[in-house]
């Protein structure tokens, strides 16, 4: 029978776990960046445009109130 050395049995799984963790980190980072590019977070200009489309001319106070309520809802 083939006798495995003890250090191979210990070191190889540890290296595989570390490599998988590093690869997973970079893959998830890339996926998240792509998601944010396609779906940017809401900002004040988007709120102004949305209110304008609804036929309202928003004041700065209304825009700030909507932003505050969105931040509070997170």
Image (tube, rainbow, N blue to C red):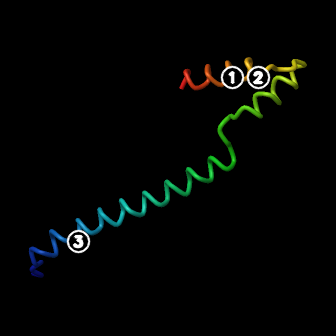
N-term-proximal mark, 3 vs 1: 3
Query: Residues at badges 1 and 2 in contact (C-beta under 8 Å)?
Result: yes
N-term-proximal mark, 3 vs 2: 3
Query: Residues at badges 3 and 2 in contact (C-beta under 8 Å)?
Result: no
Image point (15%, 68%), residue name: 10
Image point (56%, 50%), residue name: 32
Distance, label 3 to label 1, CA atoms, is 55 Å
Q: Position of residue 72 (x, y in %)?
A: 55, 21
The residue beneath circle 2 is 60
Q: Is residue 39 left or right of residue 56?
A: left
Q: Residues within 10 Å of mark 2 (few under 14, many from 20)?
A: few
Q: How many marks?
A: 3
Distance, label 3 to label 2, CA atoms, is 60 Å
Instruction: Pick out the residue farthest to the front.
Output: 60
Quadrant position of residue 62: top right
Q: Residues within 10 Å of mark 3 (few under 14, many from 20)?
A: few
Foreground: 59 or 53?
Answer: 59
Q: Position of residue 23 (x, y in %)?
A: 42, 63
Image point (12%, 81%), residue name: 2
Q: Is residue 64 left or right of residue 6?
A: right
Q: Is residue 6 left or right of residue 57?
A: left
Q: For residue 73, which numbered disc appears in the image?
A: none
* Quarter of the figure with the N terminus: bottom left
Q: Position of residue 54 (x, y in %)?
A: 86, 20
Identify the secondary structure beneath mark 3. Answer: helix
The residue beneath circle 3 is 12
The residue beneath circle 1 is 64
Identify the secondary structure beneath mark 1. Answer: helix
Distance, label 1 to label 2, CA atoms, is 6 Å
């Amino acid at each position: 029978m083939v006798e495995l050395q003890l250090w191979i049995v210990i070191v190889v799984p540890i290296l595989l776990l570390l490599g998988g963790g590093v690869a997973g980190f970079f893959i998830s980072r890339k996926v998240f960046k792509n998601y944010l590019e396609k779906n940017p977070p809401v900002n004040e200009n988007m709120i102004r445009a949305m209110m304008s489309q609804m036929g309202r001319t928003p004041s700065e106070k209304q825009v700030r109130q909507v932003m505050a309520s969105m931040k509070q809802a997170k």
